[in-house]
Every structure is written in structure tokens, then in C-alpha cells.
Amino acid sequence: MSEDTRILGIETSCDETAAAVVENGRHIVSSIVASQASMHAQYGGVFPEMASRAHIETIYQVISNTLSQAHVGLEAVDAIAVTRGPGLAGSLVVGMNMAKGLALGSGLPLLGINHLEAHLYSIWLVEDEQEPSFPLLGLIVSGGHTELVLMRDHLTYQRLGGTLDDAAGEAFDKVARLLGLGFPGGPAIQEAAEKGDPESFKFPRAWLEGTWNFSFSGLKTAVLREVRERQPELEAGVEAPRPGLPIANLAAAFQAAVVDVLVGKTLAAAETFEAKEILFAGGVSANKPLREAFQSQAKIPVRMPPLELCTDNAAMIAAVGHRRFLAGQRDALDIDVLPTWPITG
């Protein structure tokens, strides 16, 4: 089978409605992402019912514009790849039903894609770099997921460990809300931390020795305790700056603790499993201090997607679709979404 493909990707796992056309698993012909972040900001997190409704209102136009920008119609596409999970059930259903309708009407193959797997494949979309060399150690830090995965070949994964409670992204959101910094938490914490001292508070690092798992709930609780000790009259979750609270120092110390654990455990796993390279992907991979720590401490190459491919997008869905199409995957039109789908292979 020829390795030349043109895949239409569709992504609606959370609060981004996205579509993309990707050629040969590496070249982004067109990509559109409609974010709902501003809509959900007032709630301090994603409101699932509103997210699914927004997907319904947006998805047709996003896909139509994506195909127009690529100057192609469905007749020029080889397959339709859509996020099957994990994610919000209502949001996933919108994208899946749209993909099923397009596949049924066009006769094109339907490919259900794991969202976590797709974050790893965002690295392949960096065309000006050589493809990564196996075996790879992947760190996926996206939404409610913090996963360490050993990737020995395309579509072949061994999950080494993951979060036992709050994922890194969730911890960023919750601490940002606690400090009155708003949503999404990652960029807000990073900005506040730029003026703070990461050594100002000795926040805990949960190393969970003997495992490759992560835990950030204790770190979140430590920040909460510091806030309540200084201003016990204030309730958690106030969406406003707090006079007298050392927000910059708290943000910097919290961020440093997250960075230390993510980098430390990833580098140790890469050495243990003799990985040739590290793939670091997902929304939290946009964090500047985290990227800098990997680049300065790693003894092997660390691949990261450009910032525009760190957060949810459909190009990465199409990139996996390319590999799965070549591998012969063809899904029936009655497949269901899998909101808690682990990465396996």
C-alpha cells in the first residue's frame, strides 16, 4: 500500500472544536481550532453541557472551512479520523456523529483515534525535523492525564505509569483558581510565577519511589494550606487577586514543584528503559519553565511540539489516522465513544 495519504481529522474531546487535513502523516495542509476557553473561564473550568452544545453549533462550519482552506473536497480524502476518547462523553459524541455521517455519505473509511496517542504524534507534524527514533519515552500531560509511555514502534505502547489523583494540568487549574488567577490555569500560573521566587516555599514533591506514577493532590493541598493560613477569612475559588497574598511566590514555588517531578521521573524512566529520545506533549508541554528544564537537563534529545500543537487540535488526530490507515484499521459505523479509553497498543 502506498504511504501517500490525505486524512481529514476531527477533534471534539473537550472544549476545542477542531478539524484538519494532513498529508502523509506529517504535512498540515489546513487546520482550524475553535476554542471555547473564554466561555468556560467564568466557571473556572470546562462546563460539559455547554461544551457539547458549542461543538454542535460550530463543528459543521469548522470542517467546511478546513476543507475549503485545503482546497479539497471529501472525494480527495482517503479516510476520516475522529477522536473516540478519552474525553467528555457529550463532546466526543458530537465529533463522532459528524464523522460517521461524513463517512456514510462519502463511503470513506472511519478511524476512531485515541486522543492521548494523538498528542504523541503531534511531534511528527514538525516537518523540518527528522522523525523520532525508537524506542521513545513519551510524557503526555493533557487535561486530566499525566502519562508515561514507552513507545517501541509506531502504534506500539507500554504504559509505565500515570496520575493517581490530580493530573498536572488539573493541579494548575485548581491552584490558579485558588490564587484568583483565572482559567485556564497553566498560562495564568506561568505568568504570575515570572515575578516570584521558586524557593520561597518548600512545597512537597511526591516521587512515589518504585513506580512511574504521579500524584499532585498533596502539592495542591500544600498551596491551599498556605493560602488559608495567611487569609483564613477568604474562601477558595475567589476569582480576584488577593491583597497581601504572595501570589507570585506561591505560583513560582508550585510551578517549580510540578516541573521537578515531571522532569525527574521522565528522565529516570528514559534512562531505565534505554530510550533514544523523549517525546513531551499535551497542553502542559506549552509551559516555558518545563520546556527549559527538559532541554537543560536531558542527556538525550527531547522532542516537543510547537506551541500551537500543544493544546488539542485535529492535525494530531489525522497524523495518527495516517498510521492506522496504513496499518489497515477500518472501524464500523456503529462504534461508540470511549470517554475513559486508556492508551494501549
Image (spheres, rainbow, N blue to C red):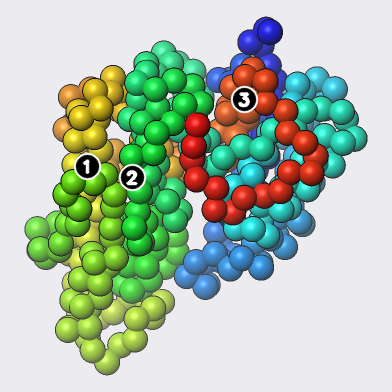
Q: What is the x, y in percent for residue 297?
A: 16, 33
Residue 53's tag is none
Query: Is residue 64 in view from this perspective?
Result: no
Number of dots carrying numbers: 3
> Where is mark 3, residue-wise?
324
Q: Nearer the viewer, residue 299 or 276?
A: 276
The amino acid marked with disc number 3 is: Arg
Label 3 vs label 2: CA separation?
Answer: 24 Å
Q: What is the x, y in percent for residue 313?
A: 57, 40
> Where is mark 1, residue-wise?
265
Label 3 vs label 1: CA separation?
Answer: 30 Å
Q: Quadrant of residue 199?
A: bottom left
Q: What is the x, y in percent for residue 126?
A: 47, 23
Mark 2 or mark 1, whichever is nearer to me = 2
> Where is mark 2, residue-wise?
161
Q: Is residue 227 above or below residue 88?
A: below
Residue located 29% across and 79% down the image: 242
Q: What is the x, y in percent for residue 186?
A: 37, 55
Give the crowd class for mark 2: few <14, some 14-19, many >=20 residues within 10 Å. Answer: some
Discs 2, 1 touching: Cβ within 8 Å: yes
